[in-house]
Structure formats: C-alpha cells, structure tokens
Image (tube, rainbow, N blue to C red):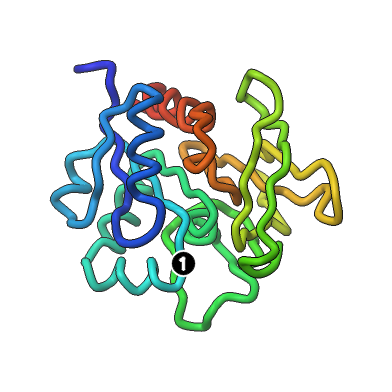
Amino acid sequence: MSDTPVIGVLALQGDVREHVAALAGAGADARPVRRPAELDAVDALVIPGGESTTISKLADIFELREPIDKRIAGGMPVYGSCAGMIMLATQVLDGRPDQRGFTGIEMTVRRNAFGRQVDSFEAPVDLTGVEGGPFHAVFIRAPWVERVGAGVEVLGTVTDGPAAGRIVAVRQGNLLATSFHPELTGDTRVHAYFVELVRTAR
C-alpha cells in the first residue's frame, strides 16, 4: 500500500480547487468527488466551504448522502471546513428546516454565527496538534460551535474580539471540522494534520 493517502474533495459546490491544491501540497493524492464510484476510490473526504443548504440538496441529487453516511459509519476520515462543519454537525441552529447533514460530530453549531458576508474577518487561532504558532484563520459567513458532546475534542477557539472564546475547530475520532477556511491562506498545516490523521486511520 502506498503511503500517499487518496483524499477526495466533495465537488458539489464551494472551494473545491483550493482544497485539492492544499491537500496536494500536504502530501495527499487529492481528487474531486461527485459520484458514488468516485467516493469508493478514496481513503478520506473533505467537505468544503460553500452554502450548506445547497450542498445538502446536491448530495441527494447526486445520490451521495447514503454512501457518505455509510463510509463515515465505517470509519472513513472526513474534514469539513465552514459549510462542511455545518454538514458534519448533529444539530444546526438557524438552519433551514429541510437541511440535512451527514452522520457526524456530536456538536451544536450556529449557522452564519459570525454574521453576513460583509462581517467576514481574519484572526489568529491556536490549534491543538498543529505546530508552528497560531494559524491565520479566515472566517466567511462562518458558523461557530455552541456545544460539544463528551467525545469531541476542542482544538481551537477565537482568542480576541467580540467572539473571543467561541469554538472554531473540533475533532471527534476520524472527523475533523473548522469554521474557518484554511484552503484560502496558503498555509497547509491544517491539511497536513488531516493527511496524517488519514494515514493513521489506514
């Protein structure tokens, strides 16, 4: 078995190319996933930022919801950023009634918690398990985590400003989620963390 993990990026909507590039820079064989057969060929999956209700609808249209749920239940590592975090949450506040996520992390997230597009901001976040100092995090219509279950590890919180103390990075087993967009920064440390998680899971 090659030491290079094959990691798919759910290519229904959002920052697909940016995640593929960041994963490749972190040592993975990265490829887009739009069909169940493409999901079958990967070791792990990234759910990118975008619009969570749109991703939810397209997952049904492309017949990916049940296959993704089954792979997660079977231990497949998944990383969700921004909308991807919402898709992995067991409970979503301020979401649409018809919005459905995947089987995921035992947490409650608040959709668009940091405000609208014009309220987007950048801030340093200290991340447990990610060396090299604070991560320069980009928040765009981002969620935050209001509650985590007993099995969820909090990896990062906002340290400054009106949102200080809000949880923005978590992990539960092979599932990782951030409310920010590391794929937009040129810093591949979060992706490298996930690639190593995938290697360990294999």
Using the rendered view, name the quadrant where residue 79 is placed. top left
Q: Residue at x 30, y 70 (%)?
A: 58
**Residue 2 at x, y = what percent?**
21, 17
Whether residue 123 sits left or right of residue 70 in the image: it is right
Whether residue 175 sits left or right of residue 107 in the image: it is left
Using the rendered view, name the quadrant where residue 91 is placed. bottom right
Q: Residue at x 64, y 61 (%)?
A: 109
Residue at image mark 1: 51
Whether residue 4 sits left or right of residue 1 in the image: it is right
Q: Residue at x 76, y 44 (%)?
A: 158
**Residue 137 at x, y = what percent?**
64, 41
Using the rendered view, name the quadrant where residue 143 is placed. bottom right
Q: Quadrant of the C terminus?
A: top left
Q: Residue at x 46, y 67 (%)?
A: 51
Q: Is residue 123 above or below residue 69?
A: above
**Residue 18 at x, y = what percent?**
39, 43
Q: Is residue 19 above or below residue 23?
A: below
